[in-house]
Image: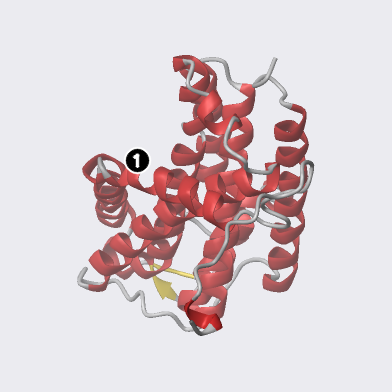
Amino acid sequence: MPMSDQPKKFVIPTPGEPVIPFFNWGGMRALYVKEVKRFFKVQLQTIWAPAFTTLLYLIIFTVALGRGGREVMGHPFATFVAPGLIVMGMMNAAFANSSFSLLVGKMQGTIIDYLMPPLSTGEMLAALVGAAVTRAILVGLALWVAMLFWPGVDVIPVHPAAVLWFGLMGSMLLSLIGVLTSIWADKFDHSAAIQNFVVGPLSLLSGTFYSIENLHGVFQALSHANPFFYVISGFRYGFIGTADSPVLIGAISLLVINLLLVWANYVALDRGWKIKS
């Protein structure tokens, strides 16, 4: 019998020798698929409802503030506000997804399903954040396609690289904040408090509906301290080619903030803070 036709023998690993020596791609992919399927089973609520709500914002603010050919930063008001609404919808979807998984596991007593599989802290964090970013991208695509056919709105990207970078950074920012929230929270009221008193205000005060050039100097300084502002401004720059903040500084600042949040989430998960105890 040729050597190639001989059956392969199963080799029992030496005790103490890791079966998965470096990176558990299969396990991470399984958790990622599980999280994606969870929100996709109720896509009417998780994807289409947020997109529909954001479109209502576009209608309301365009009718209320965009009449008479009003322009902001040299662009029609509807075109100015549309990119900010798209990325704001993406960010809210990312937070909603990542702030749910671990929290519902703690409340229902199923958190062991996340802790028992042979996944490292980094692999679990990557899967949770990846699923939240996926949901954000789907919401963003739904909004973008709808706005392509919206009268008076131009959402053809001028700088696609900026759209991709700031869309990804904004989605990751809220995904990481959501995971940290789900680790800290003990009930849904805690998660809702972060949404209502942190994420919501920072989103509305991020320059989505206005240019900070029209604000007083003090409020301009406060806007520049808001990381959401750099997401909105940079994402809008990708569509209209105009920004009210230094694009490069915003891109680097968001990367640094996301890296710090990755570290904070990793430490909290690795130590099992409010999860294993």
When the figure is inspected, residue 104 is found, relative to residue 127, above or below; the finding is above
Compared to residue 263, the image places residue 179 above or below, namely above
**Can you tell which quarter of the image residue 269 is in?**
top right
Q: Secondary structure at mark 1?
A: helix
In this picture, is 156 found above or below 182?
Answer: below
Look at 37% across and 65% down and name the residue there.
Answer: 77
Numbered circles on residues, count: 1
255 relative to 129 in the view: left or right: right
| Residue at image location 64% in from the left, 23% down from the top | 184
Question: Is residue 123 shown left or right of residue 4?
Answer: right
Mark 1: few/some/many CA within 10 Å (<14, 14-19, 20+): some
User: Is 72 above or below relative to 223?
Assistant: below
> Which image quarter: residue 136?
bottom left
Q: Report whether residue 205 is seen.
A: no
Residue 13: percent from the left, percent from the top?
70, 50
**Residue drawn where x is 68% and y is 50% of the image:** 19
Q: Position of residue 117 (x, y in %)?
A: 57, 37
> 47 or 277, which lies in front?
277
Residue nearest the observer in this picture, 192 or 15: 15
- Mark yes or no: residue 210 visible: yes
- Residue at the outermost front position: 1
Going by the numbered disc 1, the residue's amino acid type is: Arg
Q: Nearer the viewer, residue 232 or 91?
A: 91
Q: In screen coordinates, is 76 left or right of 271? A: left
Percent across and percent down for residue 251 are: 69, 67
Q: How is the image coloured?
A: secondary structure
Residue, disc 1: 38
Between 186 and 127, the one lying in front of the other is: 127
Question: Residue 108 appears at what percent x and percent y?
Answer: 44, 16
Image quadrant occupied by the C terminus? top right
Left or right: residue 266 compared with residue 66: right
